[in-house]
Image: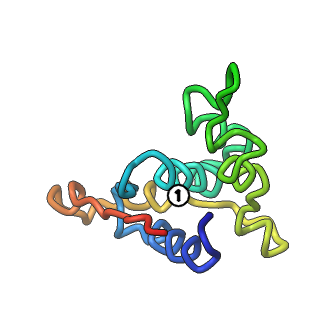
Amino acid sequence: MPSDAKLERFLTVLDNPDAYPILIHCYHGTGRAQLYSAVYRMEYENWSNQEAREQTRVVLSTLGYKSSFALGRGKGDFLDKYTKRNERQGRLVKTTLAFEKHQNSSSQSQEENNAITAVSVIN
């Protein structure tokens, strides 16, 4: 599971409107990228923990199969217990998507709008 330091580094990139659009990827593309994408959805799109966790995989568990995102598994339990920053800080703060700020900026050139910030998720 991601350390607090890695989560903070990830969220710092997402908080920067100049970093958008962003591509989230990891080496295999089957676990960490989805985990961080779920964190993005909870932090910036106000998805519930359950909704973000359930949308990481088409099938979380069936007939003896349990995805790593199912409850009772590492990533599933991490997302189920994840607390958004504004809740950890003990105050409710309306989260404004940096993406919207970036999209609404009329001073950006087309080339700047097409730039992608890649966030590499490393263990």
| 64 horizontally vs 104: left or right | right
State which quadrant residue 94 falls in: bottom right
| Viewer-nearest residue: 24 or 15 | 24
Secondary structure under tag 1 reads loop
- Residue at the (79%, 71%) spot, across then down: 88
Q: Residue furthest left?
A: 111
Task: Tell me where residue 26 appears, x and y as whole percent.
Answer: 39, 57
Furthest residue to the top?
Answer: 63
Left or right of residue 121, residue 54 in this image: right
- Which percent across, then down, holds residue 15? 50, 69
**Image label count:** 1
> Measured along the vertical axis of the image, is residue 42 above or below residue 50?
below
* Amino acid under disc 1: Leu
Residue occupying the point 69% across, 47% down:
76
Report the quarter where the N terminus lies.
bottom right
Counting from the top left corner in percent of width and height, residue 100 is at 45, 54
106 up-or-down from 13: above or below: above
Q: Which residue is mark 1?
A: 97
